[in-house]
Image (cartoon, grey):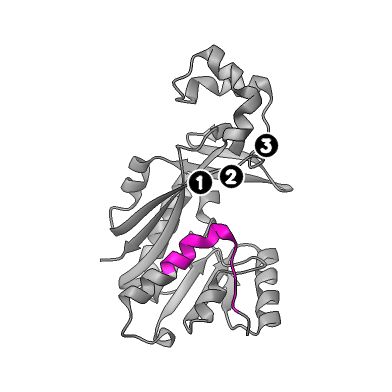
């Protein structure tokens, strides 16, 4: 069986696997049960845990993404227990899993639904269990590259062929969501990429000036319009957590 290689943006998942091994070096992986919330896709991150011997479970709200993940499992002879499910109402009993994580899935929930999902992940974890969560940071620039802000920190815009929600959080907002957890590590990843954003019109760019928090004068903000695509800053905060 060939080793599964994930995309470069899955580095936090590799880090989580390494962290688990450092904490559970005396246990065999087959004794350990992990849940991926948002487990679909053509190269499911759960595959690297399965190849390490973990008992792997995953939920995804999209039939299409689950079909892609199942096709990968068939092709590579990997056993994953995948089913349709919503991380806001995880279809498992309390204290079922040793580990739970999400990879660029929770960011598509509203802020209120994000709080529900985090509570659900806490519920299905065993005491002492570990969790990996990722949040898009409000330090992203420019925020309007995620689309139109329709509620504080919630942006709707085109991603691929579909309209998609992205929720952006400040550090303080995240802290308020994690009061029931012990924070073991926090990492901020910043990427500078051209072409990551949809190009706004000049009018949309200027409309975003009052809430940009950039410190620029209005004229300087206008002058940045033509070059902002070269400065696109995408910031993501990753937390490794433990359920007390």
Q: Residues within 10 Å of mark 2 (few under 14, many from 20)?
A: many
Alpha carbon separation for disc pair 3 and 1: 21 Å
Instruction: Name the quadrant containing residue 220.
Output: top right
Residue 198 - label: 3
Q: Main secondary structure of the magenta part?
A: helix
Mark 1 and mark 2 in contact? Answer it, CB < 8 Å. yes
Q: Position of residue 106 (x, y in %)?
A: 50, 54
Residue wearing tag 1 = 110
Range drawn in magenta: 3-16
Q: Residue at (59%, 73%) from the top-left corner?
A: 83
Work out whether 133 lies above or below 27: above
Q: Farthest right residue?
A: 161
Q: Which one is earlier in the sequence, the residue at label 3 or at label 1?
A: 1
Residue 165 - label: 2
Alpha carbon separation for disc pair 2 and 3: 14 Å
Magenta residue check for 13? yes
Work out whether 229 lies above or below 201: below
Q: Which one is earlier in the sequence, the residue at label 1 or at label 2?
A: 1
Q: Residue at (50%, 68%) from the top-left corner?
A: 36
- Regarding residue 91, the answer to whether it shows in the image is no
Alpha carbon separation for disc pair 1 and 2: 7 Å
Nearer to me, 42 or 100: 42
Instruction: Name the quadrant containing residue 222.
Output: top right
């Amino acid at each position: 069986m060939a080793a599964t290689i994930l995309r470069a943006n899955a580095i936090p998942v590799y880090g989580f696997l390494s962290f688990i091994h450092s904490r559970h070096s005396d246990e065999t992986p087959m004794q350990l049960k992990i849940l991926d919330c948002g487990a679909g896709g053509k190269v499911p991150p759960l595959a690297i845990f399965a190849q390490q011997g973990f008992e792997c479970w995953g939920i995804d709200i999209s039939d299409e993404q689950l079909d892609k993940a199942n096709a990968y499992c068939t092709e590579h002879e990997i056993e994953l227990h995948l089913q349709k499910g919503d991380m806001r109402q995880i279809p498992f009993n309390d204290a079922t899993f040793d580990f739970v994580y999400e990879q660029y899935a929770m960011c598509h929930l509203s802020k209120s639904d994000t709080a529900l999902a985090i509570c659900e992940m806490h519920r299905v974890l065993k005491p002492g269990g570990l969790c990996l969560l990722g949040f898009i940071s409000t330090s992203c620039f420019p925020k309007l590259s995620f689309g139109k802000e329709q509620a504080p920190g919630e942006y709707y815009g085109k991603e691929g062929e579909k309209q998609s929600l992205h929720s952006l959080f400040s550090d303080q907002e995240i802290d308020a969501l994690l009061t029931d957890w012990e924070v073991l590590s926090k990492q901020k990843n910043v990427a500078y990429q051209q072409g990551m954003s949809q190009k706004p019109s000049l009018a949309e760019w200027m409309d975003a000036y009052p809430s940009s928090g950039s410190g620029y004068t209005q004229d300087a903000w206008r002058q940045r319009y033509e070059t902002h695509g070269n400065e696109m800053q995408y910031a993501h905060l990753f937390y490794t957590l433990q359920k007390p």
